[in-house]
Amino acid sequence: MMRRSNPFEEIESMFERMSRQFDEMSHQFDGSRMMGADYGMDIDVRDGADEYVVVADLPGFEKEDIDLSIAKRSLTISASREMHEERESDTESSEYIRRERRHESMRRTLRLPEDVMADDASASYKNGVLTVTIPKTAVESDDSHRIDIN
């Protein structure tokens, strides 16, 4: 009996290979996985009456993985973690075909207004959401004066 061949089989196979290669390439250049990336972290900044509140999504990170700092009116949020722990029993009986879960880090720097009290800033982390509260400085009286035009 003669086997009917599919004339598109070779083309389909070629497209599958191209698709796999594209997937592999795109994972290498994915900004959320790049060290020091300034994107990949969603944030909200709220201007309250007495304080600024920054809310950042950091799902999957532990509190110990997160570092916060304020320097020269810039708030920097960075997080770094190992994605996978290799167990000795895993390596004895199996071999990886593809391994992408290694290390993840995110970093975001926000410029702050001048009227903040950086030393009094506080932060909390719950369910993958970081909340940073930065009090505003007291508004000083306006020392300006009117200038008459001649």
Image: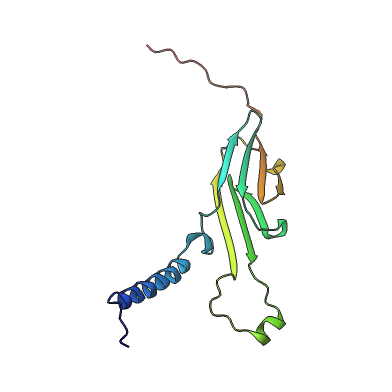
Residue nearest the observer in this picture, 118 or 61? 61
- Tell whether 89 sits left or right of 26: right
Picture quarter with the N terminus: bottom left
- Tell whether 14 sits left or right of 108: left
Residue at x 55% of width, y 52% of height: 41
Tell me if residue 139 comes above or below residue 72 in the rendering: above
Residue that extends furthest to the front in the rendered view of this protein: 1
What is the count of numbered marks?
0
Residue 53 drawn at (x, y percent): 63, 38
Tell me if residue 36 comes above or below residue 57 in the rendering: below
Residue 47 drawn at (x, y percent): 59, 33
Residue at x 53% of width, y 63% of height: 33
Picture quarter with the C terminus: top left
Residue 48 drawn at (x, y percent): 62, 31
Residue at x 35% of width, y 72% of height: 15
Residue nearest the observer in this picture, 16 or 39? 16
Tell me if residue 47 comes above or below residue 69 in the rendering: above
